[in-house]
Image: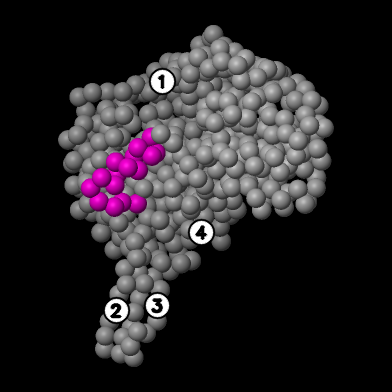
Amino acid sequence: MFENEVTFVKMAKAGKEDEFHRLYEEALKEVPKYLGKEYPNLIAGEVKEAKKIMEISPVDGKELATFQLSSQESLEKALKMLNGSYRKWYNMGYVHRAKVMLKVADKISEKKYFFSALLAYENGKNRTEAMADVDEGIDFLRYYALNMIENNGFVHLTGKGYDNEESFSVMKPYGVFAVIPPFNFYAITVGMVAGPLTVGNAVLLKPSSDIPLISYLTVKLMHECGVPEDVLVFLSGSGSTIGSKIVENDGIAGIVFTGSREVGLNMYHKAQAKRPKPVITEMGGKDAVIVTAKADLKKAVEGVFRGAFGFSGQKCSATSLVYVEEPIYDKFVDALAERTKGVVPADPKKKDTFIGPVINKDAFEKFKALSSKFPQYGKVVAGGHALEQPGFFVEPTIIKDVAKDCELVKNELFLPVLGIIKVKSLKEAVEEINKSEYGLTGGIITEDPEEIRYYFDNADVGVIYANRARGASTGAVVGSQPFVGWKMSGISGKGTGSYYYLQQFLREQSQTIAH
């Protein structure tokens, strides 16, 4: 039976928060043992390249480790091996593969404090968010493995076309999937690898250049748990170099990608140039929350604050817009600004830190460039400044009285910047949301059940919440809230952590035996 890991929640309920922090602090001391080293590519053995890339910590701007800038030769070697090996992995049977993935989940669970501490160094995530991230990766592994078993490997006896025939529907792997994940969630990397592997494909992982170390260690752990080295490859490098070469290579049977809309659409078109291929993408969002005049103000402020500024707004589900009804507009804005002004970005390794750095220098410079435009969008009521100190820290920023058609409303920034817009009614807010080209997540804060029902019935958004103080548009839990993007937010229309996810990595074969 599937059960979510949710470590911090369970510890808090049991009155063991002090123990949680003690174990995390101990793990922090272990992380430096892994830093300052060079890590190879993994192609059924260690492979080093002529060119290297450096991983930089967003916390202090210092080098963490050295990785390989993968060559075309290594890519070709990897794909030849993977294409020759995936059938062996598939033929081991779905029960064997599921058991291996469950073992991986158990091993990551044993190391979850270490992995959480490592994320503080790599992507600047605070300890409770980092633990939730690692927990979600564990959940993906277990959920998909159990889903495979519950569905008998997606093999079904079908109808009898003729009296002397027996027919079956058998879902089979495509071959080799390229997995290209983002920096912001370790769980996305784990889930995107686990999906195609669990059903019998081989996987080429091109990790995010901002979290390569935790990705490398996870691949090593998967190999140790029984995933054959010749069906799971680790190739590091930038997306603009090795990433584009992977997408265009005919040795790839399918691609699973999470990242920006621009890159995702470009990848989709390039992947189809020679032949049809499954391309499964999640391409971000411009996520809006509605606060009606019937909202609980305290709940609205906390939900929007956490949704907008958790992990410095670097979530595709982050609350980036709020539509507020006129009667409570000023009161809500003042309360949210007051809540935000008291929070200072800080080192994520510290116990009380909520907001850490943005991921890298490019994100930091992007914020600085945008900050000069903030007054054009509306009135800045909190934040608005980049912090000139070691690392890449920027203030959580709130802009009120934003025009409905401005750049801030249309474009995903992936930064801690929130725009607030005044509306006359719930209907007007929903209409504005539905005009957006994106449709990933969203929420409503209201104490009126009829308003919730109207929003749920009419919002063209894949993941929606009502009255969520822990994050008004964020925090999908595996097995409970499938994470799926509509419109420009995704291609497949199927969600992660969902019953339908695994089937995207399989193709149907009809088998008939005549007697």
Q: Which of 56 and 276 is in front in this view?
A: 276
Magenta span includes 254:
no
Q: Which of marks 4 and 1 is nearer the N terminus?
A: 1
Q: In which quarter of the image is residue 312?
A: top right
x%, y% of residue 122? Answer: 46, 27
**Outermost residue toward the bottom?**
163
Q: In this view, does 382 lie above or below 418?
A: above
x%, y% of residue 26? Answer: 55, 29
Which residue shows up at 32% across the image and 42% down it?
Answer: 269
Q: Which mark is residue 157?
A: 3
Q: What residue type is labelled 1?
A: Ile
- C-alpha distance separating marks 4 and 1: 37 Å
Q: Earlier in the sequence, mark 1 or mark 3?
A: 1
Q: Please, what secondary structure does the residue beneath circle 4 have?
A: loop
Q: Earlier in the sequence, mark 1 or mark 2?
A: 1
The stretch in magenta equals 263-278
Q: Is residue 317 left or right of residue 339?
A: left
Tell me the residue that label 1 is attached to.
56
Q: In this view, does 344 lie above or below 441?
A: above
Q: Which amino acid does label 4 sit on?
A: Tyr
Q: Please, what secondary structure does the residue beneath circle 3 have?
A: strand
Q: How crowded is mark 1: few (under 14 residues within 10 Å), some or many (20 or more)?
A: many
- C-alpha distance separating marks 1 and 2: 56 Å
Q: In this view, does 205 lie above or below 227?
A: above
Q: Earlier in the sequence, mark 3 or mark 2?
A: 3
Tell me the residue that label 2 is attached to.
512
Tell me the residue that label 4 is attached to.
499
Instruction: Tell me, yes or no, whether the two marked residues, 4 and 3, touch with CB atoms within 8 Å.
Output: no
Q: In this view, does 114 lie to the left or right of 233?
A: right
Instruction: Tell me, yes or no, whether the two marked residues, 3 and 2, touch with CB atoms within 8 Å.
Output: no
Q: Please, what secondary structure does the residue beneath circle 1 have?
A: strand
